[in-house]
Amino acid sequence: MRAVAFDMDGLMFDTESVYWKSAAALLGRRGYEYTEELCAAVMGRPPQFCFEFFKETFSLKESWQELQNESEELFLDFLNEGFSTMPGLFELLEFLEIHEIPKCICTSSSLRVVNAVLSKYDFANRFKFVLTAKDIVKGKPEPEIYLRAATKLEIIPSKLLVLEDSTAGCLAADKAGAFPVIVIAEHNKNGNFQKAKLIVNSLNDPKIKKLLVGNL
């Protein structure tokens, strides 16, 4: 592997609980309940898909853009309550930097959300670039975002190690011909990751490092 692409929410940061709160509040205002089934249906997907899904499921009158704006306001409010990094993130970033392995972020979130999340830890300057929902036409599980990342990194997709936590992201990496690695946590422990090349429980797992530098 020549480079690493990180998903963001639920992979780098424990923000899935923040998304849960904002989605629950959005639907709760309209008399509906946010459930595990709904969460599984939208996890890792770009904003348009998520809010069109809510709109169609509950026959909501607002446009998907209006729902997105309202949800993001809620998300940013809940984000101010604080959130943590996922286990092993700092150790893996340091390892990649020591070995001069390029890294980027490929997320389905909007640029507004990405900027808010990354600014809390001042992480943006530690990555070569960040691709968000605005940079692509077809979001995860389509492969566009990881194909674009490989192009920007000037490597072939098969040399791109992708770190993901969602089924949609895993499928996107697989379709791109990259190497999908799934990191299991509480929010995705029941996910379907048949296309994963490797499944680990921490970003600091030695098996990830071995894929990048061989024998340690």
Image (spheres, rainbow, N blue to C red):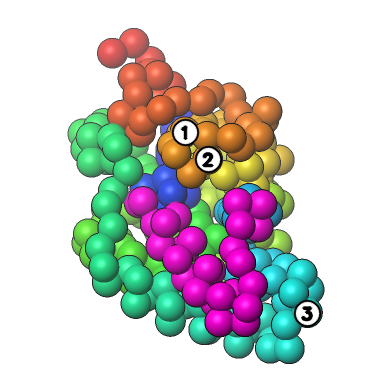
Question: Would residue 104 appear left or right of 147 to someone viewing this image?
Answer: left
Residue assigned mark 3: 59
Q: Position of residue 148 (x, y in %)?
A: 59, 54
Residue assigned mark 2: 188
- Labels 3 and 1: the sequence-earlier one: 3
Alpha carbon separation for disc pair 1 and 2: 6 Å
Q: Position of residue 216 (x, y in %)?
A: 28, 13
Marks 1/2 in contact by CB < 8 Å: the verdict is: yes
Give amino acid for label 2. Asn
Q: Is residue 209 magenta?
A: no
Alpha carbon separation for disc pair 3 and 2: 28 Å
> Of all residues shown, which one is farthest toward the front?
31
Give amino acid for label 3. Ser
Please name the predominant secondary structure of the magenta segment in the image: helix
Q: Is residue 125 above or below residue 30?
A: above
Q: In the structure shown, which secondary structural element does the residue marked by tag 3 occupy? A: loop
Residue assigned mark 1: 184
Few, some or many residues within 10 Å of mark 2 (<14, 14–19, 20+): some
Q: For the point 73% across and 68% down, which residue is it?
A: 53
Q: Is residue 48 visible?
A: no
**Residue stretch rendered in magenta on the structure:** 13-38
Q: Is residue 83 above or below residue 68?
A: above
Give amino acid for label 1. Ile
